[in-house]
Image: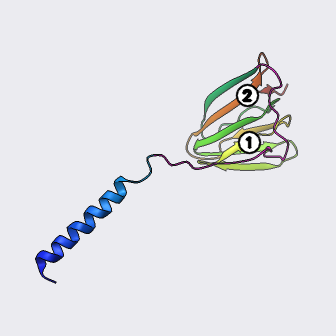
Amino acid sequence: MKPMRLALLLAVLLAAGTAAADQAAPVTVKTLITTDKTVLGQKLVLPKRDPVLIVSTYEIAPGARLPRHEHPFSRYAYVLQGDLTVEFDGGLQKQYHAGDFIVEAVGSWHFGMNPGKLPARLLVIDQVEAGQPATILAK
């Protein structure tokens, strides 16, 4: 093939590849989880009346441990960065890492801790009944 034709062919192929890339979908949806159960296999517990949505971010320092607590309603968390270990009464442990989605247990005492070297950053979503707490601390 002559050099001029080869250059023209390469230019056409490059333009076609660029056009295909420009036509890529502007929105990509990735389902992280579909479930009707918590991490312990419990049915989800949603507010029966006067629901209130609470969205929070948590940053848990390396080596830090949250106090022992439980949740009266379903709580959801997305691990944005780092690692998280959740330990339930009785010793059951669950490990989570960046990109994991957590459907927390309801009415089960547990605590979380950051075993990693980076801060653990979480996006946490609660739905509670108006006037009710999202978390109950152990006494």
Front in this rendered view, residue 58 or 22: 22
Q: Which callout, 2 or 1, points at the residue further toward the start of the chain?
A: 1
Quarter of the figure with residue 48: top right
Q: Secondary structure at mark 1?
A: strand
Does the magenta run of residues contain 67? Answer: no
- What's the CA distance linking mark 2 and mark 1? 12 Å
What range is drawn magenta here? 27-50
In the rendered structure, the answer to whether residue 124 lies left or right of residue 107 reads: left
Mark 2 surroundings within 10 Å by alpha-carbon count, few (fewer than 14), some (14 through 19), many (20 or more): many
Q: Is residue 33 above or below residue 68?
A: below
Side of 32 relative to 42 (left or right): left
Q: Please report the residue visible at 66 percent of the width from the left and 45 percent of the height from the top.
A: 101
Res 63 visible: no
Give the residue type at disc 1: Val
Q: Classify 52 as above or below 98.
A: above
Give the secondary structure at mark 2.
Answer: strand
Q: Which three-letter amino acid code belongs to the residue tagged 2?
A: Gln
Q: What residue would you read off at disc 1?
A: 103
Outermost residue, right side: 90
Residue assigned mark 2: 127
Given residues 105 and 23, the one toward you in this image is 23
Q: Position of residue 137 (x, y in %)?
A: 80, 26
- Residue at 75% x, 49% y: name it: 94
Q: Is residue 114 left or right of residue 70?
A: left
Dot in front, 2 or 1: 2
